[in-house]
Amino acid sequence: MERLEVINKRLLDNYGRFEDGRPNWRVAFRGDQFEKRLVHHTKEGLELLHPVVEERPKYFDRTDCYVLERLQGCPDGAETDLVVKSSYEPVWTFMDNHGNPVAPVWEAIFLLIRTVQENMYNAGKPGVKYKMPEEMGDSPEAVAARAQKLYNELFGNETSVGDALAYDTGVGYGTRNRKDWN
């Protein structure tokens, strides 16, 4: 799994910051997310005389997985119990079809964001239907591009020098006795 810091750095580099300086997109662990809310009841359910601001868990259901979130501002005049004017809203939860958590993958994140952006761009345009990003299509060129990308990810660091060192055929070292490896 790619480290979360690396994925969030890529998101910042590719999709920028919100007007208050926070990244537009992020991947976070659901169990670590809290929000400050104006609450009218205690955690036990008793009504308070005056509302207070408390930090509460953002997610109440499955918190053992990662989530892709987008920073959004609240419209003026919208009623909310959040204390801040903008918050991260969930776009995708990284779980398989059985509800088991899975690791976030950059290619999936890229496709999700691209799909959201295309749908937002095309919203309200008459006659525009959902269109799959061209790199995910079934054309021979798209299939070949995906295969080449996968090949480069799997074998992109293979060089003749690396192979020679791995198979003990590098010049100057002779043949190593494999029994000396512990």
Image (spheres, grey):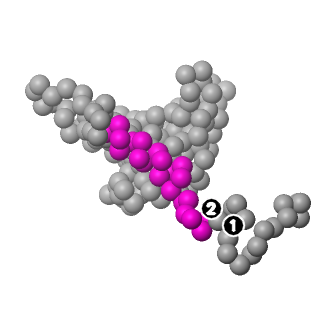
What secondary structure is the magenta-colored segment mainly? helix
Residue 46 in sight: no
Q: Is the residue 12 above or below the residue 27 in the image?
A: below
The answer to whether residue 35 is left or right of residue 123 is right
**What type is the residue that disc 2 sits on?**
Asp
For the C terminus, the quadrant is: bottom right
- The answer to which of 65 and 46 lies nearer the viewer is 65
Q: Position of residue 65 (x, y in %)?
A: 60, 36
Helix, strand or loop under label 1: loop
Q: Residues within 10 Å of mark 1 (few under 14, many from 20)?
A: some
- Queried whether the magenta region covers residue 144, the answer comes back as yes
- Label whose residue precedes the other's in the sequence (2 or 1): 2
Which residues make up the magenta segment?
Answer: 142-163
Check residue 169 in the rendering and tell me which mark sits there, or answer none.
Answer: 1
Q: Quadrant of residue 136?
A: top left
- Locate residue 33, reporting x and y percent: 57, 43
Q: Secondary structure at mark 2?
A: helix
Residue 163's disc is 2
x 54%, y 49%: residue: 154
Q: Are marks 2 and 1 in contact (CB under 8 Å)?
A: yes
Outermost residue toward the bottom in this view: 172
Q: Is residue 31 visible?
A: yes
